[in-house]
Image: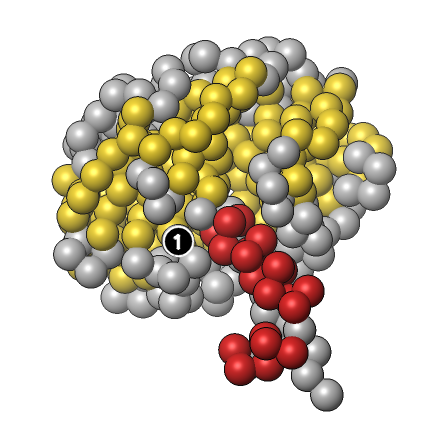
């Protein structure tokens, strides 16, 4: 579809308006306040604060992109929002301590990491049927999948280890020492390398996903914590919570190519659909920072609830060409 055809499709004009509204909304989980905030990107303001189960930390879209799942660890539940409107649809009970969560790339598996209770739950995504519970030592934190949806990798923050689990059998493939307080983890597009952020140190390690062997190390800043892709398949943002910076990593040259100062414990991130801004939760300031990616600096902030953690910018749905 092109813009000139919209005049002939009044229903589609309404759809474009809905997409624009969706692209303007940002969801932030206030982990120590049992609430989530809805922010307006255009107004640079919190528009709504909604109560939720205790200690919400992370959120994840459904495979079809129609819903967003918000996890509440202490009340053992998921709150499901409509991804178009950010309105609450339902609550899924009996999901035990879902600190971190995610769907496999093929949409067949759903995994939660129980940070407080030291186990990982692997569900069949259809109906959220529990396939297996694996107890690990200790503090399973962040997770990543291989591109074939065969393996999930998890950082064990307190025991300083990295573990690989077979999704189909729930068996441990390997479990290795990786560095102090590993947290964020990402599988690079080439599927040959994992990057693991060491929050207890000052950088990331490069890991072979086949056996967990360390293949390199890169200094970024104290409290290296979590990743977000820039969107070009090559560059990733990394928050350094203690250093109060965000590093931009070139994963082909494996070096830091830019650094942005963000005070107050920068944590989780998301990039706007137009690629112009990076939004970052500031855990220690009760704020969300807005980064202009052309200037590579913070240009604003929005007050939210206590200890903001997970963040997601709702994106417009993909354009569908219905022209004859």
Q: Quadrant of the C terminus?
A: bottom right
**Front one among 60 and 189:** 60
Q: Horizontal and vertical percent for residue 219? A: 20, 45
> Can residue 224 be seen at all in this image of the molecule?
no
Q: Quadrant of residue 318?
A: bottom right
Q: Quadrant of the N terminus?
A: bottom right
Q: Is residue 272 above or below residue 201?
A: below
Outermost residue toward the bottom in this view = 324
| Residue lying at 39% horizontally and 53% vertically, measured from the top left | 272
**For mark 1, does the 10 Å Cα neighbourhood hold few (<14), some (14 to 19), or many (20 or more) residues?**
some
| Residue lying at 58% horizontally and 17% vertically, measured from the top left | 52
Q: Is residue 123 left or right of residue 163?
A: right
The way the protein has been coloured in the rendering is secondary structure
**Front one among 225 and 6:** 6
Q: Horizontal and vertical percent for residue 290? A: 27, 42
| Residue lying at 59% horizontally and 76% vertically, measured from the top left | 7
| Residue lying at 84% horizontally and 37% vertically, measured from the top left | 127
Q: Is residue 250 above or below residue 222?
A: below
In what element is the residue under mark 1? loop
Q: Which residue is mark 1?
A: 272
Q: Horizontal and vertical percent for residue 17? A: 55, 57
């Amino acid at each position: 579809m092109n813009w000139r055809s919209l005049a002939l499709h009044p229903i589609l004009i309404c759809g474009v308006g809905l997409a624009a509204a969706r692209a303007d909304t940002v969801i932030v989980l206030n982990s120590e306040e049992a609430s989530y905030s809805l922010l307006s990107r255009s107004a640079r303001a919190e528009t709504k604060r909604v109560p939720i189960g205790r200690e919400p930390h992370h959120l994840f879209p459904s495979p079809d992109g129609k819903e967003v799942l918000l996890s509440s660890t202490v009340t053992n539940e998921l709150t499901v929002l409509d991804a178009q409107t950010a309105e609450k649809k339902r609550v899924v009970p009996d999901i035990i301590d879902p600190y971190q969560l995610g769907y496999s790339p093929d949409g067949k598996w759903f995994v939660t990491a129980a940070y407080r209770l030291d186990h990982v739950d692997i569900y069949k995504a259809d109906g959220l049927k529990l396939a297996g519970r694996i107890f690990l030592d200790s503090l399973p934190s962040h997770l990543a999948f291989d591109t074939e949806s065969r393996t999930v990798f998890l950082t064990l923050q307190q025991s300083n280890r990295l573990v690989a689990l077979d999704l189909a059998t729930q068996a441990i493939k390997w479990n290795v020492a990786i560095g102090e307080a590993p947290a964020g983890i990402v599988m690079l597009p080439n599927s040959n390398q994992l990057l693991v952020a060491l929050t207890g140190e000052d950088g990331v390690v490069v890991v072979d996903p086949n056996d967990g062997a360390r293949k390199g190390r890169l200094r970024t800043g104290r409290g290296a914590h979590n990743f977000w892709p820039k969107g070009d398949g090559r560059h990733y943002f990394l928050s350094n919570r203690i250093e109060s910076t965000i590093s931009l990593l070139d994963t082909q040259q494996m070096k830091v190519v830019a650094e942005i100062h963000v005070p107050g414990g920068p944590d989780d991130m998301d990039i706007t659909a137009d690629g112009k801004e990076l939004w970052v939760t500031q855990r220690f300031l009760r704020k969300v920072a807005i980064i202009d990616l052309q200037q590579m600096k913070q240009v604003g902030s929005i007050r939210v609830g206590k200890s903001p953690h997970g963040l997601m910018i709702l994106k417009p749905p993909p354009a569908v060409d219905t022209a004859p």
